[in-house]
Image (tube, rainbow, N blue to C red):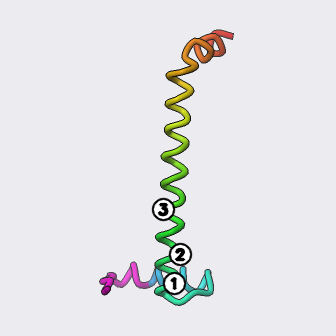
Amino acid sequence: MTIRLNEEEEQILERYAKQTGLSKQKAIIHALKRSENVSAKQLRLAEAVDFVLTHDKELMERLADA
């Protein structure tokens, strides 16, 4: 696989690789996995909030009035 980066992106990758002590290839993999984990956590949080707001609507309204 080939990844084409512009100059700014290349500099970001180089800094990230140095900060993490990884090769550029491993730094990209690390960043992808980290990004996926953050996205998954945000999705679970949104689902939890939606669940509470729909299933505990009366409770939330009473708390808002308190």
- Above or below 33: residue 59: above
Cα distance between the residues tagged 1 and 3: 15 Å
First-in-chain label (2 vs 3): 2
Q: Residues within 10 Å of mark 1 (few under 14, many from 20)?
A: few
Q: Are marks 2 and 3 in contact (CB under 8 Å)?
A: no
The residue singled out by tag 1 in the image is 26
Residue 50: x percent and y percent?
A: 49, 31
CA separation in Å, label 2 and label 3: 10 Å
Q: Residue furthest right?
A: 66
Q: Which mark is residue 42?
A: none
The magenta segment is 1-10
Residue 43 against residue 10 in the figure, above or below: above
Residue visible at 50% across and 39% down in the picture: 46
User: How many marks can you see?
Assistant: 3
Q: Which residue is mark 2?
A: 30
* Residue 60 screen position, x and y as percent: 60, 17
